[in-house]
Image: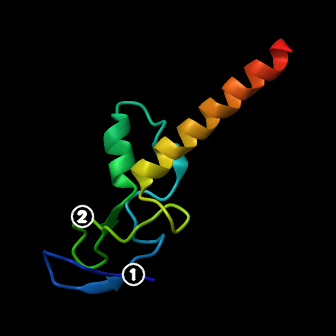
Amino acid sequence: MAIHHCSKCALDFKVSSKNRVVNRLGYIVYPFRSAEMSLEKFSWVRCPRCGKEERDESIRFLGLFQPKVAFIVILVVFLLIAIGSAILERR
């Protein structure tokens, strides 16, 4: 598990789902937010001492990708499935 250093109060804390700013996919579909900002917030943490929100580079989707890359990979996979399904239906 990664350790984050708060730039405001200098607290070192473990990055977990409790202190991540966004830890659920429903945040993306919330109205009045741009998709880019929504994806960006998935890699932010909130300091438990002072409440400052800042980006943490250690956060990965399924331990492999940064959230923005994971979102693009998921979109490409769904697009390939849709194309494959359309091709198979024509036969």
Q: Where is residue 47 drawn, in percent x and y? A: 28, 74
The numbered disc on residue 35 is none
User: Label 1: which residue?
Assistant: 2
The outermost residue toward the top is 90
Amino acid carrying label 2: it is Glu
30 to the left or right of 33: right
The reply to whether discs 2 and 1 touch (Cβ–Cβ < 8 Å) is no
Q: Nearer the viewer, mark 2 or mark 1?
A: 1
Q: Where is residue 89 drawn, in percent x and y? A: 83, 17
Q: Residue at x 43, y 50 (%)?
A: 69
Q: Residue at x 40, y 77 (%)?
A: 15
User: Label 2: which residue?
Assistant: 54
Q: Where is 48 relative to 91, above or below?
A: below
Residue 51 figure quarter: bottom left
Quadrant where the N terminus sits is bottom left
Q: Where is 70 relative to 62, above or below?
A: above
Colour mode of the rendering: rainbow
Q: Where is 90 relative to 60, above or below?
A: above
Quadrant where the C terminus sits is top right
Circle 1 SS class: loop
64 to the left or right of 12: right
Give the mark nearer the N terminus: 2 vs 1: 1
